[in-house]
Amino acid sequence: CTEIEADPHRLIQILTNLIDNAVKFTDSGHVTVKTEKQGSGYIISVEDTGIGIPKRHLLRLGERFFRVDPSRSRELGGTGLGLAIVKHLVKAHGWEMKIESEEGKGTAVRILMPESEPAEEKLSNCSA
């Protein structure tokens, strides 16, 4: 029995921001959202086949108001706060965020969520 501790409203906010970014920067192609078990936790991935992000900008992702291409961001809307909010919420949960991207091929954002210690009263439900 695996249990992940999360504020459901904040988890929805994280996913909404990540999916919105993926859709916004994928003119053609696709966006994939998946979960997978890894070790004693889970990974949620949002992957796209969009425009990708130049390597020189990867370390700045998650900074408030940072935009990879300010002209394109203004055209599509947004404040440059989406990934900063995601980064803050992920950190507040004790999770980890990894971003991989290749210019012209797309971006993958992975949220690594370790398993929580189950409460004693829930242990009986896990053993069935």
Image: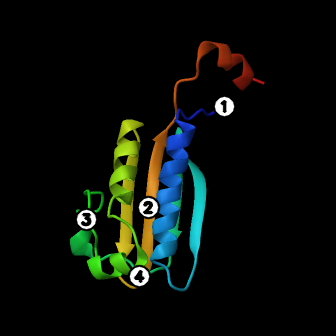
Measured in 3D between alpha carbons, the distance from the residue under mark 4 to the one under mark 2, in whole angstroms, is 14 Å
Measured in 3D between alpha carbons, the distance from the residue under mark 1 to the one under mark 4, in whole angstroms, is 39 Å
Tell me, for residue 51, which label it has, or none: 4
Check whether the beta carbons of the residues at disc 3 and disc 4 lie within 8 A of each other: no
Which is nearer the eye, 23 or 102? 23
Measured in 3D between alpha carbons, the distance from the residue under mark 3 to the one under mark 4, in whole angstroms, is 17 Å
Q: Which residue is disc 1 drawn over?
A: 1
Mark 3 or mark 1, earlier in chain:
1
Instruction: Give the percent coordinates (x, y) of residue 112.
Output: 45, 47
Measured in 3D between alpha carbons, the distance from the residue under mark 2 to the one under mark 1, in whole angstroms, is 26 Å
Q: Which residue is disc 2 drawn over?
A: 109
Viewer can see residue 27: yes
Instruction: Give the percent coordinates (x, y) of residue 125.
Output: 73, 22
Which numbered disc, 1 or 4, marks the residue closer to the eye? 4
Q: Secondary structure at mark 2?
A: strand
Q: Secondary structure at mark 1?
A: loop
Mark 2, Cα crowd under 10 Å, few <14 / some 14-19 / many 20+, is many
Say which residue appears at 42% left-offset and 77% top-offset.
Answer: 76
Q: Secondary structure at mark 4?
A: loop
Q: Which residue is disc 3 drawn over?
A: 66
As shown in the figure, which amino acid type bears the numbered disc 3? Phe
The C terminus: image quadrant? top right
Viewer can see residue 42: no
Which is nearer the eye, 34 or 61? 61
As shown in the figure, which amino acid type bears the numbered disc 2? Val
Which numbered disc, 2 or 3, marks the residue closer to the eye? 3
Instruction: Give the percent coordinates (x, y) of residue 111.
Output: 45, 51
